[in-house]
Image (spheres, helix red, strand yellow):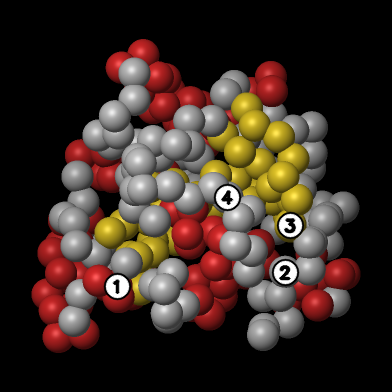
Amino acid sequence: MKIISAEFVKSATRPANYPDSLLPEVAFAGRSNVGKSSLINVLVNRKHLVRTSSTPGRTQLINFFALNGCFSLVDLPGYGFAKVPLEVKKQWGPMIRTYMEVRENLRGVVLILDIRRVPGAEDLQMLDWLEEFGVPTILVVTKIDKLPRGQRERHLKQIVDTCGLDKEAFCLFSAQTREGLEDVWERIEAVLANENPDSEVDCNSTGPLLEHE
């Protein structure tokens, strides 16, 4: 997918503040410091569209970005053991759950996992919510460059077994080497291709949008 334009729209914490837009949305979720911001920046071929940080918990709001003027990318707050105020951490779960439950133009969620970490309770809770609300899910296992190729399969098997899903449901990705970039975009394209044919939004009308680099 070739990104021609990527623009920040707004941040929000509750439905009343969401953008008044009919554009289909693909959201990104994952544990704090899992590499979510790096994944997004590589996908849209921008260095600083989403701020990256070595300090977990920087994303504390739901951030909306318009891509190519025909669909939106949504950066959800990172969850987990981030060193942020307890009151802020308590808000993240309801904030994310509410978005997935009520946002009618949500078309899919990219759930990001670290290949070096066995999925925790929060990751499994996220999978349960996505299943509960019937949201198509793209599972991306990132930071694969941190492990020798010979160790990837063993770590991936732990992740697959913990999640209780087929291996084919996961794609491997590295923000450093860009390995897996094509696979991630193909899965996002497939989600967007399921857009209601009666919708006024036509992502194919931009021409270069679906052109692979």
| 1 or 4: tag closer to the N-terminus | 4
Please give the label number shown on residue 144. 1
Question: Which amino acid type is shown beneath numbered disc 2?
Answer: Ile
Taking the view exactly as shown, the residue that stands out farthest to the front is: 54
Of callouts 2 and 4, which one flags the residue occurring earlier in the amino acid sequence? 2
The three-letter code of the residue at mark 1 reads: Ile
Q: Secondary structure at mark 4?
A: loop
Q: Residues within 10 Å of mark 4 (few under 14, many from 20)?
A: some
Q: The residue under label 3 is which amino acid type?
A: Ala
- Calculate the distance from the C-alpha at mark 1 to the C-alpha at mark 4: 21 Å
Where is mark 2, residue-wise?
A: 3
Judging depth in this view, the residue of 88 and 133 nearest the camera is 88
- Residue 61 higher or lower than 196, as above or below: above
**Which residue is under mark 3?**
6
Please tell me whether mark 1 or mark 4 is closer to you in this view. 4
Percent from the top left, x then y, of residue 40?
A: 54, 59
Quarter of the figure with the N terminus: bottom right
Q: Relative to residue 53, is residue 209 drawn left or right?
A: right
Proximity of marks 2 and 4: CB atoms separated by less than 8 Å: no
In primary-sequence order, the first of circles 1 and 3 is 3
Residue 126 in the figure: left or right of residue 23: left
Q: Position of residue 67 (x, y in %)?
A: 74, 57
- First in sequence: mark 2 or mark 1? 2
Question: Which residue is under mark 4?
Answer: 50
Q: What amino acid is found at the position of numbered circle 4 in the picture?
A: Val
In this rendering, the answer to whether 26 lies above or below 18 is: below
CA gap between label 3 and label 4 equals: 11 Å
Residue at the image point whose x is 13% and y is 79% from the top = 151
